Amino acid sequence: MNQIKTAAIISYIAIGINILIGVLYTPWMINSIGKEDYGLYILATSVITLFVFDFGLGSAVTRFISKYIAEGKNERIKTFIGQIAKLYLSIDILIFIVLFSLYFFIPTIYKELTFDEIEKLKIVYCIASFYSVLSFPFIPLDGIISAYEKFIQLKLCDLFHKLVIVFIMTISLLLGCGLYTLVVVNAVAGILTIICKLYVINKYIKICPDFNAKSEENQMKGIFGYSFWVTISALSQRLIFNIAPTILGMVSGTAEIAVFGIAASFEAYVFTFANAINGLFLPRVTRMMATESNNILPLMVKVGRIQFFLIGIVLVGFVSVGNDFVILWLGKDFVSVYSCVILLIIPSFVYLPQLIASNAVLAMNLVKYQALVFLVMGAINLVLGFFFAQYWGALGFSVAVCISYLVRVLGMNIIFQKRLHISMWGFYKNSFIKLILPLTLALLFILYLRDFFPPINWWVFILKALFVCLIYVGFMYFFFLRKEEKCLFFSVFKSKKNLF
C-alpha cells in the first residue's frame, strides 16, 4: 500500500508541475509564436493522436500480466510480452502508412486555413508523425510497470517527463525559438522518458520478452477479444477532444482551435487530477474480481468520496474565479475559454469519481458494453459538434461535448448497475448526494462575497482563490468528510499510515 500512497503523492506533484507548465508557458508560448501558430500546434498534435493510441492493448497488458502474476505463471508473462511487442510493431507499420497518406490531403481537409498556415501545418505534422511512429511500440511499457505495481518508479518517470519539458522549453522560449522547435521539445522529452521506463523494467522487474515462443491460440484470442472493444472505446473517445481541432479547422479557423485547445487542457488537468489515484487501482480491482470478493462498492465509495471532494474544489473554484483568471492569464481575447471549461468539467465532476467501477469493467472483460456506450457518445458528439461549431465555434463544440459526456455517464451507470451489480443508488447516496448541499452552500456563499473584492489584479485574484479554498474546505470539513477521511488528509504525508 505504501507504493500506492507514495505514487499518489508523486502523481499530484507531477500534476502540479503540469498545471504550472500550462499556467506559465501557455501565455508565453502564445505571445512568442502567435495565436494562429498555437492553433496549428494543437491541430497537428490532435490529428496524430486520432490514429496513434494503444488500441486497447495498454490496459490489456496490465490486465493479463496482473492475472498471470496472481496465478504464478511467469513463463506465460514472457510469451505474452513478446507477442504484444510484435503486435505493436505490426500496427506501427500500418500507422506509418496512414499518416504518410494523410499528409497529401491536408490542404483538402482544412479549407479554412490560409496557404501559409497549411505550409506550417505540414512541417509540424511531419515532426509529430515521426515521433509518434518512433514511440508507438513502447506504449506497453506503462502497462508492464503497472502490472508489477512499480507505481513509484512509473510516476517518477512521468515527473521526469514534465521536468524535462519545463527545462528545454524554457531555454527554447528564451532563445526566441518558434513553432517547430516547440514540437521537437515534446518529442525529445518523450524519447528520454521511454529510455527511463526501459531502465525501470530492466532494473526492478527483470523480465525479458520471449519473441521466439509460439503464441497460444487462446491467449491471442483473449487479447484480441478484449482489445477489440477497448479499441472501439478509444476510437469513440477520439470523436470527442481529438476530433475537435479538425472540425474547428474545417468550419471555424485556427483562433477557435486555440480557444478550444486551452479549454480542453483544463479538462485534461481535471481528469489527470482524478485519475492519479484511480489509475493505481486496476491491479487491485483485477485481483478482487479474480480471487477475492467482487463487491467493490465499499472501495468505490471510499475513493469516490475523496474524488468528489477534490474535483469539487476545482469546479467551485473555476466557477467562482475562473473568469478573472482567464482574463489575467490570456487577455480578453480568450474570455470564451471560461464558459468552455465549465461545460467540459461539469460531466467530469459526476463521472470521474466512478473510475473504480470503470476499472472493474476492464477487469471483468465487460469492455463490449462500455464500447457501445462510448460509440453512442462519440456519434452524438460528432454530429452535434459539427453542427454547433458552425455557429458558435469552440463554445458550440463544448456544448456538444457536455451533452455527449452526460450520455456516457447515464450509459455507464446502467452497465455498473446491471452487469457489475453495483448499487449505484448506494454509491450516490453515500457520496454524491451528501456532497451536494455543502458544495452548493459553499458556492453560493462564495459568489455572494466575491463582489466585495476590489478591481481584479493578480494579487487580488490570489487572495480570492485562497478565500474560495478556505470556504470550500471549511464547508466540506464540517458537513461532508467522515472522521476517517479527516484523519486521512491530516496523515497523508506520514510514512507509517496507509492511504487506503
Image (cartoon, grey):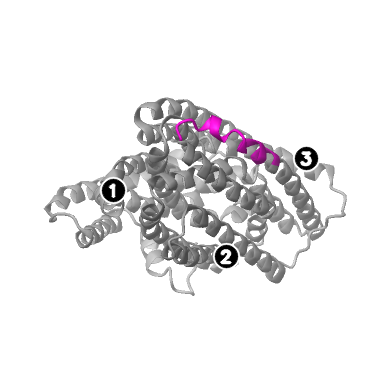
Determine the CA span between mark 1 and mark 3.
Answer: 48 Å
Q: Secondary structure at mark 1?
A: helix
Name the kind of residue labelled 1 in the image. Answer: Leu
Q: Which residue is mark 1?
A: 439
- Would you say 194 lies left or right of 75 here? left
Q: Which residue is mark 3?
A: 221
- Within 10 angstroms of label 2, few (less than 14), some, or many (20 or more) residues? many
Q: Which residue is mark 2?
A: 157
Q: Which residue is depicted at the point 65% across and 55% down?
A: 143
Q: Which residue is depicted at the point 52% across and 42% down?
A: 119
Magenta stretch containing residue 109, yes or no? Answer: yes
Stretch in magenta: 97-113
The location of residue 74, given as percent across then percent down, is 79, 60
The location of residue 155, given as percent across then percent down, is 55, 63
Name the quadrant of the N terminus.
Answer: bottom right
Q: Are marks 2 and 3 in contact (CB under 8 Å)?
A: no
- Within 10 angstroms of label 1, few (less than 14), some, or many (20 or more) residues? many
Determine the CA span between mark 2 and mark 3.
Answer: 32 Å
Magenta stretch containing residue 248, yes or no? Answer: no
Quarter assignment of residue 140: bottom right
Between residue 275 and residue 416, name the one nearer to us: 275
